Amino acid sequence: MSENGALPLRGKVLTVDTMNANVKKVDYAVRGPIVQRAVQIEKELKEGVKKPFEEVIKANIGDAHAMGQRPITFFRQVMALCTYPQLLDDNKFPEDAKNRARRILQSCGGNSIGAYTTSQGIDCVRHDVANYIQRRDGGIPSDPDNIYLTTGASDGIVTILKLLTAGEGRTRTGVMISIPQYPLYSASIAELGAVQINYYLNEEKCWSLDISELQRSLHAAREHCNPRVLCIINPGNPTGEPIRSFPYKKNSNDIYKGCEFHSFKKVLFEMGPEYSSKVELASFHSTSKCYMGECGFRGGYMEVINMDPEVKAQLTKLVSVRLCPPAPGQALMDLVVNSPQPGEPSYQTFMKERTAVLSALAEKAKLTEEILNTVPGISCNPVQGAMYSFPRITLPERAINEAKAKGQAPDMFYCMKLLEETGICLVPGSGFGQREGTYHFRMTILPPTDKLKIMLNKLKEFHQKFTQQYS
């Protein structure tokens, strides 16, 4: 302090210049500038500001319940029972829901879902996840000790990337990610200071994965980093396409009619012990998408295969720093992998609701493809999995030049104009990565069918008007 008792003047300890440089490199397009502007427009509409539309349609993020998808009754019943156990005495709840809730609560400290759990996750839930994986893969063993419950899938992915990131210069860890990619990967790679290695999916072949492209990408990357990680999203985000590179078949909740899901763990074991006993594999799943759509509960798991025991001990230490994933999310994950079975009171209602959601998603996937492909200058591959489409758009040269003059990517310029004129909020393809000279946007297929039709027709009208304006 100075002689008169006043604090001396000084600058901020934390400024943009003194903060972690890697954080400044992070970019997350799914909640980027367009979404921020969409929130502002929503406020303006509430304040009575006149717009050429009455509401903002947020098709930028895969938030199923926010877009009107109804929760699965059984899931919410068990969650209610776990949260307020006095309801276990209420005869309005079916016995199988009560039994699931009792089993989960008995595995929690003090029989309360509000207690901390073990860092790796509730024991009975990890056993249920292992049993689910074993059934999924036709009997290939899954060890509960290899299961880590996570705060959504994203948490597990970032944790594994932390373990893998090491080295400096040419020895720095390189992470191969598919382009287009989900921005979690590029953002996490930037934050951790790893090296992003792009491999491009083949848009002309429905976003398929070419082994030759993987090899090209790998060989080029070895000139400047140490490639140690291959990330695969299956089915794809943002493209909505399943991986087709392996002739192995297994049904999955996330794949629409005519396609099959390939469990990479199952493929690994079918390749024989030379691979199944050596290849290190981490797989992730969550409660957020598909017929569940329970994003806000932040439930997920990861399974690690062939991890060095000493590294696994470090992984357990790393997750323990954050104490534990949210217990309600762990409970919900349990219900996804241990859903009602034939003969149980909730089975018929559960299957009816699950089938209805999946059928609606398949219908909206087809509708999206059909309508977008009627628009000159827009081409959309079939949406065969997940809940997104990633159409390619042809932009006039004048629009491209104007966008560049404003310092914007051309598809960002397009999507911002779309938002301002129609209220439709999409994410530009530049936020996911794309081949040079191509432009796209990602949109979810989640809005109710009637609203989706309105949105697609508005998009059609806008694109025609935009093309005419800048031609």
Image (cartoon, grey):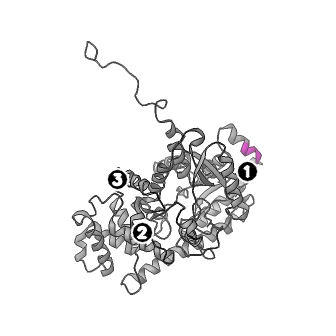
Alpha carbon separation for disc pair 2 and 1: 51 Å
Horizontally, is 59 left or right of 82 in the view? right
On the image, the x and y values in percent for residue 261 come to 58, 72
**Residue 456 disc label:** none
- Which of discs 2 and 1 lies nearer the camera? The answer is 2
- Which amino acid type is marked by label 3? Ser
> Few, some or many C-alpha atoms within 10 Å of disc 1 (few <14, some 14-19, many ≥20)?
many
Residue 396 lies in magenta, yes or no?
yes
Q: Please report the residue visible at 64 percent of the width from the left and 51 percent of the height from the top.
A: 198
Circles 1, 3 touching at the beta carbon (< 8 Å): no
Q: Do the residues labelled 3 and 2 touch (CB within 8 Å)?
A: no
Please say if 367 is above or below 195: below
Quadrant location of the N terminus in the rendered image: top left
**Mark 3 sits on what residue?**
320
Local packing at callout 2 (Cα closer than 10 Å; few below 14, some 14-19, many 20+) is: some
Residue 133 belongs to magenta span:
no
Report the amino acid beneath label 2.
Asp
In the figure, 242 relative to 36: above or below?
Answer: below
Q: Mark 2 points at which residue?
A: 143
Range of residues picked out in magenta: 395-400
Where is residue 82 drawn, in percent x and y? Answer: 29, 68
Residue 395 marker: 1
> Identity of the amino acid at label 1?
Leu
Task: Please indicate whether residue 71 sits to the left or right of residue 269 in the image.
Answer: left
Q: Could you tell which of marks 2 and 1 lies nearer the N-terminus? A: 2
Q: Tell me if residue 386 can be seen.
A: no
